[in-house]
Image (cartoon, rainbow, N blue to C red):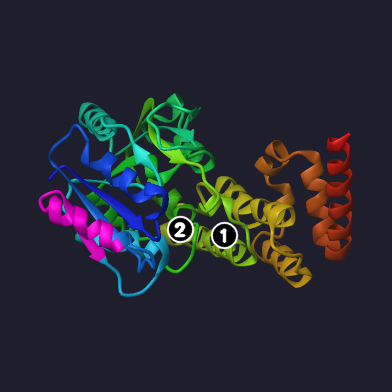
Amino acid sequence: MRLSIIVPVYNMAEDNKLTFCIDSLLNQTITDYEIVAVDDKSTDNSAEILKKYESENPDRIKVILSDRNGRQGTAKNKGINVSQGEWIGFIDSDDWIAPDMYEKLLACAEATGADVVGCDFSLVNSHTFEVGKVVNNSRDNQSGILDSDKRKSLILDGGSLCVKIYKRDRILKEGLYFPEGIFYEDNAIGNAYLVTAHHFEYVKEPLYYYYQHDTSTVHTVSKARCKDRMAAAEFMMADAKKRGFYEELKEEIDFKFIMLYYLNTVFSYMRDGEDTDIGFLKELANGLKRNLPDFELNKYYLEKINSEERKLSKMHQKNTLMFVIYYRLLWFYRKLRKRK
């Protein structure tokens, strides 16, 4: 079998999200593939929908029903373990893909000898195959046999895990399993999926449709989600050290850690979070210092992070309460200016 498509599912029955996703997979132009759908103990009727698809397409769809909710990492790991394809692709169960996505990615892999192939995606807010805002998920200069410069580039800007296919034997050989029980599992293991590859290629077409809606992980901010992001960052760094590529790619991995553990977390929490927990914010500042005491010297931090965010970060490191007061006043002032 050429391809296994792994679909982690949790409560996606509403608004036909799950059916639109599965239909797009059933309508692929290739024929030698399987869909491995893993229901992560949904509390809606997602499992029933999947079982109906399985009964109608027994040669195409394999459904696994989890006995507990372990989050997407658990579901993906279960899918990996039962998959039979030479290649593996992942798709979020609220997204969908163009009919020829996997045909084009597999053709590119076979023509070039790559063991990872990716494409672009389109941001959409309704169930449509009309292309919305296109996000270039990779760059041409990242393609080819992976040397140190390409690996550094992929660490800094590797794009989404879902818009790529991967050789299954490498996933098993390298033990590329996801952390379980947390959100942001892709961020935790994504570096290893790319850095342990030999050859990456890129199809410059938006073949994946990324559905924008309020209940998706990236649009939900809470202290619990923030702590999951911090845990994912710590997993990412520990995994790089365990696999032996941390020293070669230290500056890049450290910057990825700064972004994931700290900057994306603190500013999303302050902007959209459910409350302002001073204790949590102190924990966040101390955790960054504990893991990377010299983070302010990282070359990418100095190059890519604007002066205002660096100023706010420094303030947060020195005095959390002062940071919160200043940030809230700044945010209030800017909202007033927008109203004028």
Location of residue 316 (image quadrant): bottom right
Looking at numbered disc 1 in the image, what kind of residue is underneath it? Arg
Q: Is residue 258 magenta?
A: no
Looking at numbered disc 2 in the image, what kind of residue is underneath it? Glu
Q: Specify start and end residues of the magenta stretch as a single range.
A: 47-64
Is 85 placed left or right of 188 in the picture? left
Q: Is residue 63 magenta?
A: yes
What numbered label is drawn on residue 321? none
Which residue is situated farthest in the bottom direction here?
Answer: 67
Is 290 placed left or right of 327 in the picture? left
Where disc 2 sits, the SS reads helix
Is the residue 141 above or below the residue 321 in the image?
above
**Residue at left offset 58%, top offset 50%:** 219
Return the x and y of residue 221 as percentages of the image width and height. Answer: 62, 57
What numbered label is drawn on residue 229? 1
**Residue at left offset 45%, top offset 35%:** 150
Q: Mark 2: few, some, or many residues within 10 Å (few <14, many ≥20)? A: many
Return the x and y of residue 225 as percentages of the image width and height. Answer: 58, 62
**Residue at left offset 12%, top offset 45%:** 1
2 or 1: tag closer to the N-terminus? 2
Distance of mark 2 from mark 1, alpha carbons?
9 Å
Q: Mark 1: few, some, or many residues within 10 Å (few <14, many ≥20)? A: many
Is 306 placed left or right of 177 in the picture? right
What numbered label is drawn on residue 185? 2
Location of residue 45 (image quadrant): bottom left
Return the x and y of residue 17 as percentages of the image width and height. Answer: 38, 48
